[in-house]
Amino acid sequence: MRKEISTERHQEESRASDHPLHVSDSDTGYHRDGGEPPTLPRTTIPESRGTSLFRATQVIKLLQSKYHYKEEAEIICNKVQVKLSKECFHPSKSCITDLRTSHWEEAIQETKGGAANRKLAEECYFLWKSTRLQHMTLAEDVKAMLTELRKEVRLLLLTNGEQQTQREKIKACACQSYFDAIVVGGEQKEEKPAPSIFYYSCDLLGVQPGDCVMVGDTLETDIQGGLNAGLKATVWINKNGMVPLKSSPRPHYIVSSVLELPALLQSIDCKVSVSA
């Protein structure tokens, strides 16, 4: 039987360099070249609203050296971080660039008072954005793992998030060549955990949901979505050893590192062969 795997990366603020396959905002899938196609494991791509990737050091230096802000510089950046965590984006009402520039504009005005300074807000936003993207890279061991997996299975990257933001992250990570397909939730009618985006991903790979494996680091979207769609298996990447709530979705498998995937997938294949 052939199995498919889909993976995703965690929220936007998860560091791609720390865990390129951090399963929370993006997904990856793989498909084996013999027998039935395997499901894609979902690999996560950090989301822009997260906190672990909030890199504001360069902005603080800019505000202090060029504009002579003192402790206000860090206060402004902290305010922006809070605004990002509460961000509600509606594509029909605004673009992500305008929205996030407004976060900086509001934070500056709230801290310094006076008239709004859109020009300074734009300078801060684009510096913050470029610095963040520079730190989004795939680790060499993850690249090697994906390269080897792709010899046997099809891989699909599935990520939630706004279209422009997620595509910029994907480009910055230079991960396109490691996957057979990439699906961004902001480009679809529904995002994870809705079953429809998983069915769409399976269709792209030409496989059935029952032949796919979902790999992700977020229980509420990655694992719950895989369960909702009736995938063959779900794999939760729990690198911090977090103890989930009793009410949380229950994954079929748990690993502490995405690098454990090859061995786990082989184990799943063996169980399928025995049961068949």
Image (tube, rainbow, N blue to C red):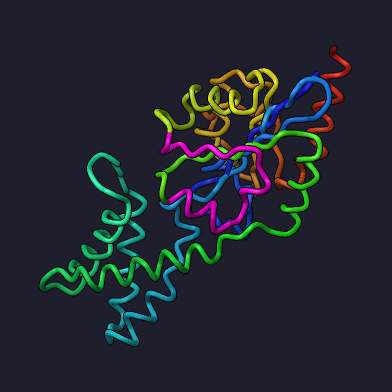
The quadrant holding residue 92 is top left
Q: Residue at x 58, y 31 (%)?
A: 223
| Depicted 109 relative to depicted 63: above or below | above
In percent of the image, x 65 and y 57: which residue is there? 138
> Residue 115 colored magenta?
no
Tell me if residue 7 can be seen. Answer: no
Name the side, left or right, on which 24 lies relative to 115: right
- Left or right: residue 267 versus residue 221 is right
Image label count: 0
x and y percent of residue 222 in the render?
55, 34
Q: Main secondary structure of the magenta part?
A: helix
**Is residue 174 shown in magenta?**
yes
Residue 257 is situated, as x and y percent measured from the top left of the image, at 71, 47
Q: Residue at x 27, y 59 (%)?
A: 103
From which residue to which does the magenta span run? 165-187
Residue 254's quadrant in the figure? top right
Q: Residue at x 69, y 31 (%)?
A: 5
Residue 73, horizontal then vertical, whole percent: 31, 76
Report the quarter where the N terminus lies: top right
In which quadrant of the rendered image does the C terminus lie? top right
